[in-house]
Amino acid sequence: MQKVRIDKWLWSVRIFKSRTLASDTCRKGKVKVDDLKIKPSYLLTVGNKVHVHKNGFNLIFEVVQLLEKRVSAPLAQAAYINQTSEEEMRKFEDWFVGKASPERRERGEGRPTKRERRELDEFKGEFFGDS
């Protein structure tokens, strides 16, 4: 039976932008396979249910195909069945889309400094409840 590391699979099917992000999320306990918290080295098999807590969303995927290398988006979507509830999928639209205008800076102020950027990110994290 073929198996692949969970961090590699999450990266290859484009759930995370990098394998490092996938590994870190596993280490933090935000990824579960069949309701068990797992390490990045967990060997995934076809038929497993993967629960991912990412950016405040609880995503659920059923593994259909095991991939070790990153593939294009259409091929990646064929590797899993998205079993995330409709309510969870609408959460993004309900809370974020069209609710607020983007940040604006006064003309002539230039780009935010690194310190200002950190303060903005910290504020947005507290406001939107990111962890």
Image: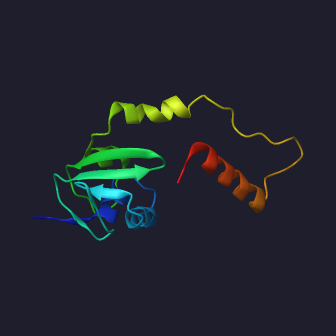
Q: Nearer the viewer, residue 47 or 77?
A: 47
Could you say which quadrant of the image residue 70 lies in? Answer: bottom left
Most extreme residue toward the bottom is 41
Q: Nearer the viewer, residue 116 or 81?
A: 116
Q: Position of residue 35 (x, y in %)?
A: 25, 54
Q: Position of residue 131 (x, y in %)?
A: 52, 54
Q: Which residue is located at x 76 percent, y 61 percent?
A: 115
Q: Which residue is located at x 18 percent, y 65 percent?
A: 3
Q: Position of residue 107 (x, y in %)?
A: 87, 41
90 relative position to 102: left or right = left
Q: Which residue is located at x 61 percent, y 50 percent?
A: 125
Q: Nearer the viewer, residue 29 or 70?
A: 29
34 relative position to 30: left or right = left
24 relative position to 12: left or right = right
Asked whether residue 14 is in view, the answer is no
Could you say which quadrant of the image residue 58 lies in? Answer: top left
Asked whether residue 80 is in view, the answer is yes
Q: Number of marks in the image?
A: 0
Most extreme residue toward the left is 1
Colour setting: rainbow
Q: Position of residue 109 (x, y in %)?
A: 87, 48
Indicate whether 94 appears above or below 47. above
Most extreme residue toward the right is 108
Q: Nearer the viewer, residue 32 or 101?
A: 32
Quadrant containing the N terminus in the rendered view: bottom left
Indicate whether 10 appears above or below 57. below
8 relative position to 111: left or right = left
Q: Which residue is located at x 29 percent, y 65 percent?
A: 38
